[in-house]
Image (cartoon, rainbow, N blue to C red):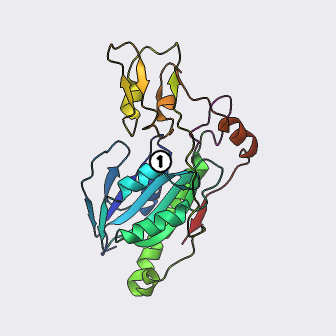
Amino acid sequence: MDTYSTTRVVFFSPTHTSARIARAVAEGIGMGRRIETDLTLDLSDTPIPVKNELTVIAAPVYGGRVAPVALQRIRRLQAENSPAILITVYGNRDYEDALLELRDTAAGLGFTPLSAGAFIGEHSYSSARYPVAAGRPDAADLQKAVTFGKESLEKLRQAESTPSILAESFFIKGHSPYKVVQAGKPSCPVCNEHCFVCGECIDVCPTRAISVSADGSRIETDINRCIRCCACVKVCPNQARIYDNPFAAILHEKCSTRREPELFL
């Protein structure tokens, strides 16, 4: 279309599930020019201007809200004349108020909300012993994301002849005030005896909570900086990074029934 020729894809995605959904939505949009803004490892506080770009913003859900670190980094965006497709990705339990929170945040940054979707990704706590949404997003999820991108673009095209379409708010499931997430006792993944200090876990940590000890003999984790995304667990080449917590078994027991994406246009 003439008004917009660029798709901006913004995501915070430690275990790549949000990134995969966001890219599939962008594939469905199909614009020739695409800019990716990966906030996962970006600790900068420099503002990110977004002008005249159809923008996909994707973030994971933590406890029914947008992951706090993701929200903090998304707030660097400064939008002008840019409609937004809002995406939350959750681990098959519930996204509760996260999608509404992301919509409100985007609007506050100057975006015009165009559409929104809650997709499912493998839970951060999922493991071989306690799988939770293992392998998701799968092929069916990604195809729905592609179709959603096409439908969102069609809505934007319709707005060319009927501008009020973008001026009107559309329903998104959630509640305001948002759910209050109680702070839990700090915890973090640890290394077992199989760790050989390769450092791959350090490279994927979005908060730089992981480092090598001063004597180079072991991996150390700042428990207060860890957000329990478990990217370090999933990337470890030797299965030496583990995170034992009581919630994995509960999630496996109560949240194994397949849930499907929920889309709002």
**Is residue 129 on the magenta stretch?**
yes
The image position of residue 169, as x and y in percent, is 50, 79
Could you tell whether 11 is left or right of 183 in the image? left
The image position of residue 22, as x and y in percent, is 45, 54
Name which residue lies at 46% across and 60% down.
28
Between residues 235 and 94, which one lies in front from this camera angle? 94
The image position of residue 219, as x and y in percent, is 41, 21
In which quarter of the view is residue 158 placed? Answer: bottom left
Q: How many marks?
A: 1
Name which residue lies at 35% across and 68% down.
109
Q: Is residue 141 visible?
A: yes
Q: Is residue 23 visible?
A: no
Query: Image quadrant for the C terminus?
Result: bottom right
> How would you classify the magenta stretch by its main secondary structure?
loop
The image position of residue 245, as x and y in percent, is 63, 33
Name which residue lies at 44% across and 45% down.
13
Between residues 208 and 116, which one lies in front from this camera angle? 208
**Is residue 2 on the magenta stretch?**
no
When the figure is inspected, residue 55 is found, relative to residue 19, above or below; the finding is: below
Which residue bears the numbered disc 1? 20
Query: Image quadrant for the N terminus?
Result: bottom left
Looking at the picture, which amino acid does disc 1 mark? Arg
Could you tell whether 33 is left or right of 107 in the image? left
How many residues crowd mark 1 within 10 Å: few (<14), some (14–19), many (20+)? many
What stretch of residues is rendered in magenta?
122-134
Could you tell whether 89 is left or right of 211 in the image? right
Name which residue lies at 61% across and 29% down.
244
Give SS at disc 1: helix
